[in-house]
Amino acid sequence: MKQLFYLFAALVLLSGCTATNPSVKQTANNQENRVPLQRILTKSKFLDNGNNIRVYVTFYLDRPSTLAEVSREVVVNYQLFAEYNSTKQALVSGNVNFSVNTLLEDKGWYIASFDVPKPKDLYTGVVLTEIRDNRSNNKTINDCFVRFQSGKVGDYYMFFDKTGTEPLLQSFVTAGDSVILKSLDSKTTVFKTMRYKYEFDPALSPMATGQRVPQKSLYTDSVYTLQSNKIIRFDTESLYYMTKDTSEAFGIGLMVVDKRFPKLTRPEKLARPLIYMSTSTETADLYGSREPKKALDNYWLNVTQGNQNNAKRTIKAFYQRVEQANKMFSTYKEGWKTDKGMVWIIMGDPSKIVRTKDKEIWTYTRNSQYSEVNFTFNRRANQFTEDHYELQRYAEYQSIWYPTVDQWRNGDVGVR
C-alpha cells in the first residue's frame, strides 16, 4: 500500500514539472475552434483607455523563442463586431505592431496588447483576435466581449505584476506574491477590500436537475483599504473582493492560492476532485478519513483492483486534467470545482466550442458511446468575476456520464 502511494505522489509531482504543449492546429470559423485546448487557454481581457479600449490576449508557442523571433514569426490581427455571429462587415480591424510595450513574455506564454477605437453609439461589442504562427501556419482565434460605456470598476482597473507592466489575466495569484492594481490613466484610487475565508463546494453532477442547494452565506473575515498604483502583497490564502463603493454590484475578485497551485499535492486536497468519479460511500471515506494518505492509497487500490499499471496511467491522466482545469477555469473558486472544470476533467477536450455573449456550448462527437452530445454553460452574473458559468443539467446525461466515469475507473482513459 505504501509502495502505491509513493508511486502516486511521484506521478503527481512529475506531472506538475512537465510543460503542457497544446497543439494549435485548428479550423477557426468566427467563434468556432476545432482545437479547444488552445482556444480555452488563450485568455483575454480589456481595460477602458479613454477614447479606446485596450485588449490583452495571451498565446502560446511550443518552441523557445525570443521576442524578436516572435515579432518576425507571429502575426496578430483583430476585428471588432457589434455582436457575436455578426454577418456584417467588421466595424474596425487592424494588425498589432509588436514593440517592447505591446508584446510581453512569461514562461513560454506571450501577451499581446492593442488599442481598439470606441465606435460612436455602441455600448458593447466583440473583438475577434487571430494569432497566426507563420512558421507552422497554425492559428488561434480568441473572442473578447467588450464594453465601451460601463460603470463596472473591473473595466478600468486590473491587477498587474509588481512592475506594473505585465497584466495578470488569470483570477488568482500565489500567496506571498506582490502585485499592483492599476488603471491605464494611472490615477490613485482607494479600494475597500474584503477578505473571505470560505471553502466552496465542488460542482453538482450534470444530472442534478433538482433545486440547487443555496450556497452558504459569505462572511467577511477582515476589511481594510488598499490603494491603486501601489505594490500589494497578499500573504493569506483567501478570496478577496475590491470595490470603490460598497453600493456597487460588481467589483474585482482575486483568489490567493498556495505556491503549488494549479497543482494539488497534499493528500486531503488530492482526494477532493475524486468526487466526480466516485460513489457516495467512497467519497465519504475519502473526505472523512483522519488518515488522508491511507484513504487515498485504499481508494486507488480498490478502483484499479491492485493493477499498478492502470493506477499509474489513471492517476497521471486524472491529475493532469485537474491541473489544467485549475489553470483554465478558476474564478472565485478553484477551476476543478466549477461546472466547466467538472466536465473538462471527466470528458476531456470538446470536439467543438461555440461561444456567444451569454453562453458556451461544448460538443463531444468522438466517443463510441454516443454520436454527439452538447454541454451548454450559461453565463451568470457574479460580483467577483466575468467568467462565472453554470451548466444546464439534464437527467439524460447519465447515459453518457456514467459510462465515461467507468472508463476512468477501468483505466481506459489515456494520458494527454
Image: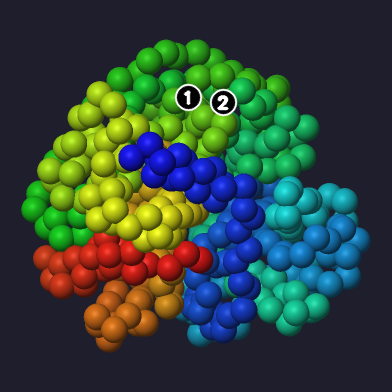
Percent from the top left, x then y, of residue 118?
A: 65, 60
Q: Which residue is mark 1?
A: 237
Please name the residue shown 56% across and 59% down the image.
41
Q: Secondary structure at mark 1?
A: loop
Identified by mark 1, the residue type is Glu
Please name the residue shown 29% across and 84% down the image.
368
Query: Which residue in the rendered view is the most extreme toward the right?
Result: 68
Q: Which residue is mark 2?
A: 175
Answer with the quarter of the image where residue 372 lies.
bottom left
- Checking the image for residue 94, the label placed there is none
Please name the residue shown 37% across and 67% down the image.
413
Percent from the top left, x then y, of residue 283?
A: 20, 42
In the displayed structure, 116 sits above or below 54; it is below
Q: Secondary structure at mark 2?
A: loop
Percent from the top left, x then y, of residue 399?
A: 15, 72
Say which of 348 and 226 sits in front: 348
Percent from the top left, x then y, of residue 163?
A: 78, 32
Please name the residue shown 34% across and 32% down the image.
293
